[in-house]
Amino acid sequence: MAASPAYQTHLPTSPEWLNKGDNAWQMTAATLVGLQSMPGLVILYASIVKKKWAVNSAFMALYAFAAVLICWVLVAYRMAFGDQLLPFWGKGAPALGQKFLIGRAKVPESTHYFKNSKIVETPMEEPFFPMASLVYFQFTFAAITMILLAGSVLGRMNIKAWMAFVPLWLIFSYTVGAFSLWGGGFLYHWGVIDYSGGYVIHLSSGIAGFTAAYWVGPRIKSDRERFPPNNVLLMLAGSGLLWMGWSGFNGGAPYAANVASSIAVLNTNICAATSLLVWTTLDVIFFGKPSVIGAVQGMMTGLVCITPGAGLVQSWAAIVMGISSGSIPWVTMMILHKKSSLLQKVDDTLGVFHTHAVAGLLGGLLTGLFAEPALCRLLLPVTNSRGAFYGGSGGVQFIKQLVAALFVIGWNIVSTTIILLVIQIFIPLRMPDEQLEIGDDAAHGEEAYALWGDGEKYDPTRHGSLNTGTTGVSPYVNGARGVTINL
């Protein structure tokens, strides 16, 4: 029997450059990251919000996933990973042609030269799999960034304004950070380290989300004061998909099933577990009892913090980063939030600023301290890169990390503001108060459950009249710990 074309080595389906193991892992990693969004964050958003916003919150995530994919292949992929247009931006073009997609993957602007020289220091990134695998893998990162941003404006943003915002923010904000740090832009060649998106994804989504929350405006008073999750167990299911999917998130970043990928997966889980335990311990010490919502927050900040350095730090450093991510965002959320008039004024629904902007910035700076020289040599374009902890040029690396963070913060504030102000000319950013009182039924004509209440304990003296107040819910919900639900 003749061998299947898939297993013959000299046919176009199996060119000499193709490493089937790397390609299989890259597609698997992309699928894992995709599952973080769909259904992971769709489920998590639907369950962590007040019952009347379950459908709207899930749909915002679902819409973003689909819209980002189409915009990505039409123009945005090559703005992020194509030929240079500006030092921080690539030339937009479709990523749909057969010749482009079945050829060997490459990042054309990633060839790195020695300073003030035409001598190549690090050759162009050319993974051993097709361009189609790289396009899809990077799409899943773009999609989850958009969905994380949505967490800041749940419970009041006009769905039509959101539908306009998604493609505009992807094109004019996300692609800038991605090209600058990953696609061969000026920060990439300067030697800034962002292994898998601490800045490109998490700092960007946290800052842009906070900025969007400012311009969209707050939820109605009753929602800000009482916003209990409608299904804590389902929230845990979504969180579990997020955690396990992170192995693809950080494990796929080297574009190969190699040593760095293995280190990254281990460090990712170590940091997440440490952060969850530290956050839970602080809850017990200061509030007397552990919180499931708090544990999810600690898990999230740990995953975010390790992301910029997952494949570049030693595993003991992952524990240190987990301790930091379980404590510093906890302080900003539980203590600083109460004392800051700005943080109180801006209604960041799920606290994306704390869990992504603060944790992402923290991770980037700690990577500037703990990036291990031998691991850096496996992955980075600039030779002799190292964290400040290892001496030599490490102090300069920390400064680079700080400057890159300031660029990402500044760009996202400005671009997000301009995009929303333009949309506001044509579409109101916030739903009218009368629709906000109703929720899903007003926005979509659909409801998540044919049940009374918003997740509170049953009170027969009140629920006989379908009162939607809440009693006996987590301190994270009623404000005793500083904010509503944060993720």
Image (cartoon, rainbow, N blue to C red):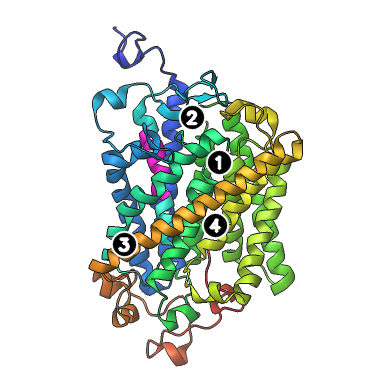
Helix, strand or loop at label 3? It is: helix
Q: Is residue 94 above or below residue 327?
A: above
Q: Which residue is mark 2?
A: 255
Tell me if label 1 and label 2 are in contact, CB under 8 Å: no
Quarter of the view holding residue 451: bottom left
Callout 4 crowding tier (Cα within 10 Å): few <14, some 14–19, many ≥20: many
Residue at x 40% of width, y 87% of height: 467
- Front disc: 2 or 3: 3
Asked if the stretch drawn in magenta spans residue 464, the answer is no
Q: Which residues are magenta?
A: 135-144
Quarter of the view holding residue 89: top left
- Front disc: 3 or 1: 1
Instruction: In the displayed orientation, state which residue is furthest to the bottom.
Output: 461
Q: Quadrant of the N terminus?
A: top left
- The kind of secondary structure the magenta stretch mainly shows is helix
Q: Is residue 363 above or below residue 450?
A: above
* Residue 458 shown left or right of residue 320 in the figure: left
The numbered disc on residue 162 is: 3
Q: Is residue 347 above or below residue 71?
A: below
Q: Is residue 12 visible?
A: yes
* Residue 314 shown left or right of residue 404 in the figure: right
Q: Which residue is mark 1?
A: 194
Tell me if label 3 and label 1 are in contact, CB under 8 Å: no
| Residue 409 locus on image (x, y percent) | 51, 55
**Among the two numbered marks 2 and 3 on one chain, the one whose residue lies closer to the N terminus:** 3
Return the residue nearer the eye: 317 or 236: 317
| Residue 458 locus on image (x, y percent) | 48, 82
Residue at x 41% of width, y 84% of height: 468
Q: Which residue is mark 4?
A: 357
Residue at x 41% of width, y 18% of height: 18
**Among the two numbered marks 4 and 2 on one chain, the one whose residue lies closer to the N terminus:** 2
